[in-house]
Amino acid sequence: MAALRFRFAPPTVTHGARGNYALTNNTDHSVGAGHHRMPFFQKLSQTQREAFTAHSTAQLMSQFLHGEQGAVMTAACVTHSVPDINAKLYAATQTMDEARHVEVFAKYCEKVAIVYPMAKGLKGVIDATLKSDRFEKVMIGMNMIVESMALGSFNNVYRTTQCELLKKLMFGVMRDESRHVTFGHTYLGPLFAKMHPDDLEDCAEFAFQAVSMMWRRPGAATTTDSVDKGFLEVLENSNIDPADFFKGMKEAAEQGITQELPPGQIHSLNDLMMPALARVGLFTPTIRKKYDEAGITIFEDQRVLEAMEGGNPVA
């Protein structure tokens, strides 16, 4: 499949009680994946560039869908397993939020007529979270790891898209996710402060393993065996030879050309996930050594995280 067509009349956002939102079916859905400044892209035809933008956007939307599906299951797991009644009630509302997000992104993916597979790292974290042996780990995996990644990604789409529908949708989802991230800190912070050191170390190890699944070593994305299978499908569907693509990426890296985030965009790992873990005390001395050995830099500046959370993300 060399080209992706945005079919049918895509949805609009409608707002219901308590700020909830859903989708109806009568608004334009043109969504861009951003402009690529790497020299290799200048050599591609306009058709290839447009196809790549469309398919990479479809892949991103697919990850949003898969992540929200996982969030429904993990939030329901927290509702069942957390011992505090107030936490149960909040987790139940989060489950409802996530179910609404699934419906929204499912309709979006339906409109672009393709769903890409779940990324390996995301699948690994969600699987590990659902299989974990205590509710604190479920909340680490979802409210701190996956939700932080999602919140940053939603912000970046919100900042770059030219589609007013998607901008409204992203902000609505960001508002929910920012509350979910806050819940993780508010509930887990006091628990970890009183937790037995051995149990805290166990939770910190779980967080390290989850971060490791999501983290990619700088410069790693220059070979076909280091990139997610779904992205290779994007290249195939865009009629771009993977060998040529990764050769171009490697040459750009050798020339010192990097893909820095534009102003206003967020690095999910550095700006949200790491500070969230640091705030609740999950960087123990033992675990800090493991991050260092793995080459993963720990970021503890919480200013971006604090600005984004609490149900009022910075717009």
Image: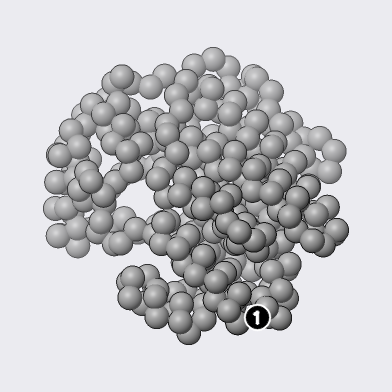
Residue 261, quarter of the rendered image: bottom left
Determine whether, in the image, residue 276 is placed left or right of residue 254: right
Residue drawn at point x = 47 percent, y = 20 percent: 113
Question: For the view shown, which residue lies furthest in the bottom direction?
Answer: 285
x and y percentages locating residue 191 in the rendered image: 71, 74
| Residue at 36 percent of width and 77 percent of height | 292
Q: Would residue 281 be found to the left or right of residue 256 on screen?
A: right
Residue 126: give x, y in percent of width and height: 53, 49
- In the rendered image, which residue does mark 1 sit on? 196
Q: Is residue 32 visible?
A: no
User: What quarter of the picture does the N terminus occupy?
Assistant: top left
The residue lying at 22 percent from left, 43 percent from top is 224
Q: Is residue 129 above or below residue 137?
A: above
Rendered location of residue 302, percent (x, y): 57, 73
Please state which of residues 105 and 121 is positioned toward the viewer in this rendering.
121
Q: Nearer the viewer, residue 15 or 283?
A: 283
Instruction: Determine the residue located farthest toward the top in the rendered image.
Output: 8
Residue drawn 69% across and 37% down? Answer: 99
In the image, is residue 218 above or below residue 191? above
Q: Is residue 46 left or right of residue 302?
A: left
Q: Secondary structure at mark 1?
A: loop
Question: Which sits in the foreground, 84 or 233?
Answer: 84
Q: Is residue 21 above or below residue 113?
A: below
Query: Residue 61 location, x and y as percent?
Result: 49, 36
Q: Quadrant of residue 202?
A: bottom right
The type of residue carrying mark 1 is His
Quadrant where the C terminus is found in the figure: bottom right
Disc tally is 1
Callout 1 crowding tier (Cα within 10 Å): few <14, some 14–19, many ≥20: few
- Which of these two is toward me, 193 or 105? 193
Q: Is any atom of residue 306 visible in this view?
A: yes
